[in-house]
Amino acid sequence: MTPPVPAKSSAGASLFTRQVFLGYASLCLIWGSTWLAIRVLVRDVPALEGAAIRFLAGGVLLLVMALLQRRPWPRDGRTWNAIVVLSLTIMAVPYGLLFWAEQYVTSSMTAVLFSATPLVVALVTPILTGRKVPRNAVFALLVAFGGLMALLYTSLSTSRPALLGGAAIVIAMSLSGWSVVYAKTRLHDVDPVVSTAMQLLLGSAALGWGVWVFEAHRQARWTGPAIGALGFLTVFGSCIAFVVYYWLLKQMQPYQLSTTSLIVPLIAVLEGSLLGREPIPLLMLAVMAVVLISVGAVLRAEAATLREDDLLMLRGRAE
C-alpha cells in the first residue's frame, strides 16, 4: 500500500483555487473579446499578415520575459518536436484560417462554430490516451455536429466566400481540439512562457511564408482601430491568454479547461451585437444553445469517466 500524501493546508488550497478561478475567468473574458478584435483588424490589414505580426510581436515580448527571468528551457528533442508541431496546429494554421474566415463571417458566428472544440477533444482523447468515449457523449457529438452543419448550410451558404469561411473555422476548431490533448500529453513539464514564446515565433514564421505566397499583392491600411485591435490581440490574446492557458492546462484536465467554450461564445455574441453591431439570426442562437448543451453533456460524461478511472487507480494502489 502506498504511503499517504500529506494534505495541503486550507489556506494554500483556497489560494490555489482562487488563482485557478481568476486565470480561468480571465481566459474566458480575453478569448471572448478576441473574435471582435480579429474582425476589426482584418477590415484594414490582410488576414495572414495581421496574424503573423500578432504572433511575432507576442513571441518577442514573451521571449524577452523568459530571458530576463531566466526561465528553464526544454532540452530534449521530443519536447522541441512537440513545440514545433503545436506552432503549426494550435498557432499558425488555425489562426491563419480564423483570420482569413473573419473577412467573410461575423465574429459572433465564428465564436459559435469554434465553441464545439470540446467535442473534438472528447473524440481525440481516446486516440491519444486510450480512454473510451461514453455513449451519451457520442450522441451529444452527433447532435452538435448536426446543428453546426445546419448553421453552415442555412446561414453561410448564401455566398461561396462565407461558406468557405465557415469550413475554414471548422477545420481550425478541429486542429485546436486535437492540440489541447496533444499539448497535455507532451508539454506538461515545460515552462508555459518559454513554450508559448517559441510557438508564437515559429507560428509567425509559418504565417510569414503564407503572406509571401498569398498576400504579396495586398497592402495594409494601419488605421487607428486596426492598430488598437492588433495591440489587444498581441498583449492580451497572445501573450497573456496563452501563458494562462498552458498554466491552467497543468492544473486542470483537458475536458475541464475546454469548458471555456461554454462561456467564450456568449461573450463574443454579446460584444459582437453591442459593439460590432452584428446581426444575430435566431438560427444562430438556436444552434448555439444546441452546441452548448451538447458540450455540457460531453463534459459531464468525460468527468464521470475520469472519476471512475481515478477510483480504479486508487483501488489498484491500495491492493
Image: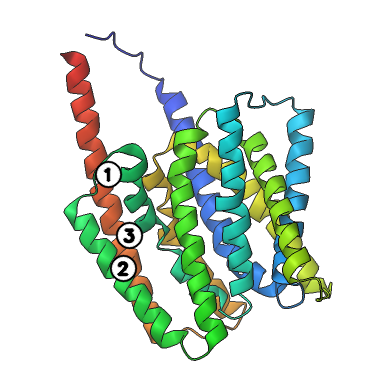
Upstream in sequence: badge 3 or badge 1 = 3
Label 3 – label 2 distance at C-alpha: 8 Å
The reply to whether dot 3 and dot 1 touch (C-beta < 8 Å) is no
Q: Nearer the viewer, mark 3 or mark 2?
A: 2
Query: Residue 32 lies in what quarter of the image?
Result: bottom right
Query: From this viewpoint, is residue 266 visible?
Result: no
At a point 75% along the width and 58% down the height, the residue shown is 208
Q: Are marks 3 and 2 in contact (CB under 8 Å)?
A: yes
In the picture, measured across the screen, residue 299 lies left or right of residue 226, that is: left
| Percent position of residue 210, x then y | 71, 63
* Secondary structure of the residue carrying numbered label 1: helix
267 or 96, which lies in front?
96
What secondary structure is marked by label 3? helix
Please state the total of marks drawn on the protein image: 3
Q: What residue type is labelled 1?
A: Ala
Name the quarter where the N terminus is drawn: top left
SS at circle 2: helix
Which residue is drawn at the image coordinates 27% and 44% (left, top)?
A: 303
Q: Is residue 309 above or below residue 271?
A: above
- The residue beneath circle 2 is 144
Residue in the image at 18% along x and 27% along y: 312
Point out the tag, 3 or 2, that comes first from the N-terminus. 2
The span from disc 3 to disc 1 (Cα, nearest Å) is 12 Å
Is 83 located above or below residue 33 in the figure? above
Mark 1 — residue? 303
Label 3 crowding class (10 Å Cα cut-off): few <14, some 14-19, many 20+? many
Specify the label residue 295 is tagged with. 3
Q: What residue type is labelled 2?
A: Ala
